[in-house]
């Protein structure tokens, strides 16, 4: 990472510097600040388990003691190591590559250079920063909390906390202890894609996911798939902004906040890391990473990693397998100029965990009908459609980005991040279709089929719901700093091409269905004219154009920061539905103004307050545009519409922070007002489970978040977080021709209380961490006539790091225990419904009830890991 420094390091890169208070979340710039006061003397551990002030040849990234950014990200030198002695932070040059990716843009304009007291949360001007090599000196709460200065709520976990968790843990798992984060999982080890997160009651499709300036959300449904993002060993930090995304982030749907992911910085010296894991459910995982070090005198360095993992389903039949590659190539030169190329490739074949209703949960728990069948049985009640192999989900993704930052004369900085992505996946399921009398849309087909697994004219088939998507775009911004003022103007363009089909693959008498990827002319059911028999056939091209401008003003010797921004988002969707009977074109155009305002005031070096108000919007999922038909009857099974209303929200936060050399804490009050609130649901289209959205009208959400962490004291670091949430529906909801009396009811997926606590011990060799999470009850219907109970889960890790031995650097042994009390519990609402029981509407009609579905949380698991750097 390229950082400002008065004297370049020996490698030609800038020395370590801290990142300061910020306003990039609101398009504002703010002054540089620092913590600590002694020089850097050591490098990070090769295993990455004990990061320090500088990155070594093979670690999880730059060390936490080097610097703390406003988003909680570390800032290290472009070579990944701080130079010895003092590093003067020159405010005339803002932080480079690190600040662009998940960190806050900043500038320092104080007329007086001041030394910040240890733990100070105050933004400062020109100052000399010397950082101790204590590996966790600045990471309170065992790496689960960091001091912040942005005028919005942000919680961050660092590489030291990540390094103690199970290596298979996903980004959702890692942030689950942070305030407001409510994670619903289906397996204990992070392999299953059937997982979800809500933040302050706002679902995962209302959260933006960004990796170093590149968007990661699904282009059709806005959801995130954390098992695809990156391997945990390559994360330098994960920042969860609970309130909103910063103005430059390339996301459309971030009313629920932003999850900002950062890769580690490539090491300055050549080396690597390797680990091997084995544990419950025949889980095995292997990981290797190679660092090139600086290549010659070019200033170019990079890393590439590969991992393979596999695990049996913890309940029911099935096995998951995942392969993953991460890489990053970084070039720095001059004063904070940088260019990088980074990416992730992922391929997985996952088994399916059925969701449960409350009735089936009470009757079967984790057994019986809540699992798929281990053997294919054409004679059972489901006619073999419950066979587990018919539900295996393959997917393949590739993410690429090339962030660039150039510092020019007259206070100008230019940032741009071009990106490209491609993905293909199949969400299959078992179903039956007639061998004659099929419908293509609303047209009866003359075709007849002779298919295996046929009984009484009905054949068991695998319904393949495939999605093929391509995406490319770029963000660019020009920042001008003049005196106490910082002006930023930018543009975001995004082009996406998404095609979704549903075809059918015959199932043999022994339950085998060829080509797990689906949609092939050679294996899928074809008509007499040679075309594929399809029940879904839509294609959507979306283009996003967004213009934004922000300005910030630093006053009262940098104590007061005022920032304001405006973003205009223009989204065009051009869709086609090739199913006979449906409207062929499905086009929408949206233009939404999004203003924002923020204030931060530094009361004393340890006390800080902030306030912000932001606006957000999102459009419904693509499936809402298209009609679908039942291939058995030709009846309309889903009504598409192009006049669907966008969600719009206004939110406010009022917060207080405290940071000194012992404690770091924050308290945030928040308020949201929604119109046309979009709620994700899980529908079944001819046997395939597909996400969609429904309009839940107006909603008001209010609450408070709190978190507190203790810096290491006798090697112990405790952490606590909590949230109180009161989210209510503002109006009655339409159901058929009547209104459900939902006004004043509690919103779905919105637990009133959540709390988490963690205790970390780390003396440099022996270490351990214990975390416990309480999640209160949450409603699963808009009528509040069904809810899932509260639950408590706990995880633990213990390990030991050895001294260097021969070419092995800091070998480590670790045991991770997940759900240590082996709780059987419902972990979240998978598919909310309007009402579970028959209800009388406002106009007197009876509205039939429908049972919601729930995720079943993962059971106990243990995982042993041996790792070393070299």
Image (cartoon, grey):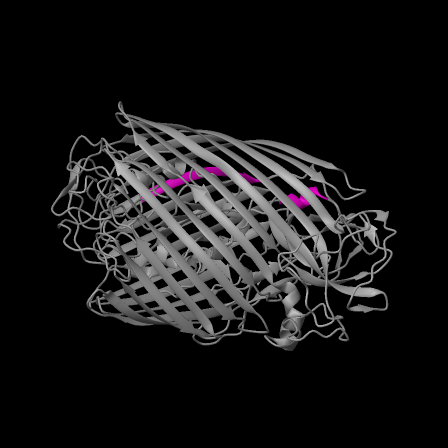
Q: Nearer the viewer, residue 789 or 805?
A: 805
Please provide percent x and percent y for residue 385.
Answer: 72, 67
Judged from this view, the residue extending furthest toward the left is: 85
Please provide percent x and percent y for residue 168.
Answer: 43, 63
Please provide percent x and percent y for residue 289.
Answer: 34, 57
Residue depicted at 40% across the width and 70% down the height:
795
Q: Nearer the viewer, residue 289 or 6?
A: 289
- Horizontally, residue 635 falls left or right of residue 356, namely right
Say if 191 sits above or below 208 in the image: below
- Horizontally, residue 262 falls left or right of residue 753, namely left
Judged from this view, the residue extending furthest toward the top is: 410
Q: Nearer the viewer, residue 291 or 150?
A: 291
Q: Nearer the viewer, residue 756 or 442?
A: 442
Q: Is residue 620 visible?
A: no
- Horizontally, residue 187 falls left or right of residue 130, namely right
Magenta span: 609-626
The stretch drawn in magenta includes residue 19 = no
Please provide percent x and percent y for residue 118.
Answer: 18, 50
Say if 814 sits above or below 143 in the image: below
Residue depicted at 30% across the width and 37% down the height:
338
Q: How many circles with numbers are drawn on the protein?
A: 0
- Horizontally, residue 361 falls left or right of residue 597, namely right
Q: Is residue 385 visible?
A: yes
The stretch drawn in magenta includes residue 618 = yes
Quadrant for the N terminus, please.
top left
Quadrant for the C terminus, please.
bottom left
């Amino acid at each position: 990472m390229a950082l400002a420094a008065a004297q370049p390091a020996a490698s030609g890169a800038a020395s370590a510097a801290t990142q300061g208070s910020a306003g990039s979340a609101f398009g504002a710039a703010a002054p540089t600040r620092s913590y600590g006061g002694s020089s850097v003397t050591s490098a990070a551990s090769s295993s990455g388990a004990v990061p320090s002030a500088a990155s070594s040849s093979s670690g999880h990234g730059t060390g936490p003691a080097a610097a703390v950014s406003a988003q909680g990200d570390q800032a290290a030198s472009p070579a990944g190591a701080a130079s010895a002695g003092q590093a003067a932070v020159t405010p005339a040059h803002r932080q480079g590559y690190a600040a662009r990716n998940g960190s806050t843009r900043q500038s320092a304009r104080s007329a007086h250079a001041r030394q910040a007291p240890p733990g100070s949360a105050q933004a400062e001007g020109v100052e000399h920063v010397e950082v101790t090599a204590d590996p966790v000196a600045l990471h309170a709460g065992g790496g689960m909390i960091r001091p912040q200065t942005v005028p919005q709520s942000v919680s961050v976990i660092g590489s030291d906390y990540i390094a103690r968790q199970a290596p298979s843990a996903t980004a959702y798992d890692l942030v689950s202890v942070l305030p407001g984060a409510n994670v619903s999982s289906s397996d204990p080890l992070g392999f299953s894609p059937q997982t979800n997160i809500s933040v302050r009651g706002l679902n995962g499709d209302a959260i933006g996911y960004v990796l170093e300036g590149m968007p990661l959300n699904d282009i059709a449904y806005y959801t995130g798939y954390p098992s695809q993002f990156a391997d945990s060993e390559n994360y330098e930090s994960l920042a969860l902004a609970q309130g909103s995304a910063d103005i430059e982030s390339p996301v459309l749907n971030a009313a629920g906040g932003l999850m900002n992911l950062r890769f580690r910085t490539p090491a300055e010296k050549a080396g690597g890391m390797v680990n091997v894991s084995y544990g419950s459910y025949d889980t095995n995982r292997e990981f290797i990473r190679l660092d090139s070090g600086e290549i010659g005198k070019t200033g170019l360095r990079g890393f590439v990693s590969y991992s393979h993992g596999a695990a049996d389903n913890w309940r029911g039949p099935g096995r998951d397998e995942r392969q993953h590659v991460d890489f990053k190539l970084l070039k720095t030169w001059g004063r904070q100029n940088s260019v990088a190329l980074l990416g992730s490739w992922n391929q997985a074949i996952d088994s399916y965990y059925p969701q449960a209703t409350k009735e089936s949960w009470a009757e079967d728990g984790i057994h019986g009908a809540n699992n798929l069948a281990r053997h294919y049985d054409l004679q059972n009640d489901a006619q073999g459609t419950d066979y587990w192999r018919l539900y295996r989900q393959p997917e393949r993704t590739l993410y690429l980005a090339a962030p660039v930052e150039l510092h020019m004369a007259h206070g100008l900085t230019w940032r741009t991040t071009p990106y490209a992505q491609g993905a293909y996946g199949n969400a299959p399921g078992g179903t039956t279709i007639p061998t004659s009398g099929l419908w293509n849309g609303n047209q009866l087909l003359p075709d007849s089929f002779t298919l295996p697994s046929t009984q009484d004219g009905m054949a068991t088939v695998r319904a393949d719901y495939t999605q093929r998507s391509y995406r490319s775009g770029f963000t660019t911004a020009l920042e001008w700093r003049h005196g106490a003022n910082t002006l930023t103007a930018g543009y975001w363009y995004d082009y996406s091409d998404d095609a979704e089909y549903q075809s059918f693959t015959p199932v043999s008498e022994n339950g085998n269905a060829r080509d797990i990827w689906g949609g092939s002319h050679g294996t899928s059911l074809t008509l007499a004219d040679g075309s594929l028999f399809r029940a879904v056939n839509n294609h959507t091209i979306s283009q996003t154009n967004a213009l934004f401008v922000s300005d910030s003003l630093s006053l009262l010797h940098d104590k007061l920061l005022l920032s304001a921004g405006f973003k205009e988002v223009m989204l065009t969707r051009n869709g086609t539905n090739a199913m006979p009977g449906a409207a062929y074109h499905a086009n929408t155009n949206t233009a939404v103004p999004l203003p924002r305002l923020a204030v931060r005031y530094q009361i004393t070096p340890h006390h800080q307050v902030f306030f912000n108000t932001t606006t957000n919007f999102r459009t419904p999922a693509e499936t809402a545009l298209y009609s679908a038909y039942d291939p058995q009857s030709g009846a309309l099974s889903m009504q598409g519409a192009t006049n669907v209303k966008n969600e719009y929200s206004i939110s406010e936060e009022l917060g207080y922070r405290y940071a000194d050399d012992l404690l770091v804490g924050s308290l945030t009050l928040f308020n949201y007002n929604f119109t046309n609130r979009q709620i994700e649901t899980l529908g079944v289209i001819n046997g395939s489970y597909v996400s969609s959205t429904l309009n839940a009208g107006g909603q008001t959400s209010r609450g408070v978040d709190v978190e507190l962490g203790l810096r290491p004291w006798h090697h112990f670091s405790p952490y606590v977080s909590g949230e109180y949430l009161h989210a209510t529906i503002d109006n009655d909801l339409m159901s058929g021709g009547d209104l459900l009396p939902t006004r004043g009811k509690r919103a779905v997926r919105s637990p009133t209380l959540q709390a988490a606590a963690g205790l970390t011990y780390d003396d440099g060799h022996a270490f351990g961490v214990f975390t416990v999470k309480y999640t209160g009850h949450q409603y699963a219907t808009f009528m509040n006539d069904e809810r899932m109970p509260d639950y408590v889960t706990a995880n633990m890790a213990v390990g030991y790091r050895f001294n260097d031995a021969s070419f092995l650097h800091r070998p480590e042994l670790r045991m991770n225990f997940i759900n240590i009390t082996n709780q059987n519990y419902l972990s979240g609402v998978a598919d909310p419904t309007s009402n579970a029981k028959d209800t009388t509407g406002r106009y007197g009609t009876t509205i039939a009830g429908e049972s919601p579905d729930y995720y079943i949380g993962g059971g106990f698991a243990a995982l042993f890991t041996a790792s070393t750097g070299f």
